[in-house]
Image (cartoon, grey):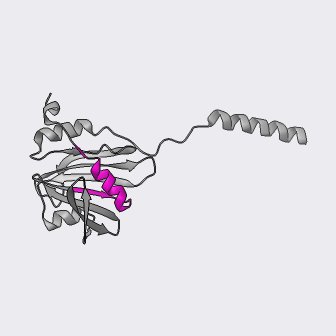
């Protein structure tokens, strides 16, 4: 009986080893640079792209939203690491209360200001996360995420302008 169990155990072990597949990375990463370069040619404002180390883009688009009317919105979102907090940036020329509510997940103004590289960003808090809002240079820029305020501020500090000259070549 012991030999029979040992033979079955070896067969099961061989089957398990031969069929082992490491789990796939749950994050489907994309390269947002090509979309950002196209947007830089079309947008009437400086297009920003995150350069935060460890952040991985999962979505990038340039299209109107329900509250932006006909105005397109630049959006790029992703995660910090493989399971870290979500963080995104959206930009548009729209700055209506309805648009800000949409982009901040129905956030409300906290009354606090975050100084990020000398720019004053308004803090918004929602049940689903936090947002920083900056209205400057002809654009409404919203940085949103599920991390702490410090995470969002570091993410906002990593935003770099996409070079329009290289975007057109």
Q: Is residue 148 magenta?
A: yes
Depth order, front residue of 82/135: 135
Q: Which residues are magenta?
A: 142-160
Q: Quadrant of residue 11?
A: top right
Give x and y (percent) for residue 49.
25, 44
Measuring 73% from the left and 39% from the top, which residue is drawn there? Answer: 12
Q: Is residue 37 magenta?
A: no
Give x and y (percent) for residue 36.
21, 40
Depth order, front residue of 49/60: 49
Measuring 90% from the left and 42% from the top, which residue is drawn there? Answer: 2
Residue placed furthest toward the front = 118
* Above or below 3: residue 98: below
* Above or below 70: residue 50: above
- 4 relative position to 139: left or right: right
The mark tally for this picture is 0
Depth order, front residue of 47/52: 52
Measuring 13% from the left and 61% from the top, which residue is drawn there? Answer: 95
Give x and y (percent) for residue 133.
21, 60
Give x and y (percent) for residue 129.
34, 64
Residue placed furthest toward the top = 169
Q: What is the quadrant of the C terminus in the image?
A: top left
Residue placed furthest toward the right = 1
Q: What is the quadrant of the N terminus in the image?
A: top right
- 57 relative position to 69: left or right: right
- 3 relative position to 33: left or right: right
């Amino acid at each position: 009986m012991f030999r029979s169990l040992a033979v079955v155990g070896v067969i099961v072990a061989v089957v398990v080893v031969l069929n082992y597949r490491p789990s796939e990375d749950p994050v489907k990463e994309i390269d947002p640079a090509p979309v950002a370069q196209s947007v830089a040619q079309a947008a009437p404002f400086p297009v920003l792209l995150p350069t935060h180390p460890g952040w991985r883009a999962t979505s990038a688009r340039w299209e109107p939203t329900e509250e932006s009317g006909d105005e397109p919105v630049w959006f790029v979102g992703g995660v910090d690491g493989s399971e870290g907090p979500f963080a995104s940036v959206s930009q548009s020329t729209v700055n209506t209360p309805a648009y800000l509510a949409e982009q901040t997940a129905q956030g409300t103004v906290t009354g606090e200001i975050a100084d990020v590289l000398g720019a004053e960003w308004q803090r918004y808090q929602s049940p689903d996360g936090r947002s920083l809002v900056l209205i400057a240079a002809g654009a409404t820029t919203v940085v949103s995420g599920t991390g702490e305020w410090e995470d969002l501020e570091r993410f906002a500090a990593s935003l770099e302008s996409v070079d329009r000259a290289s975007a057109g070549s």
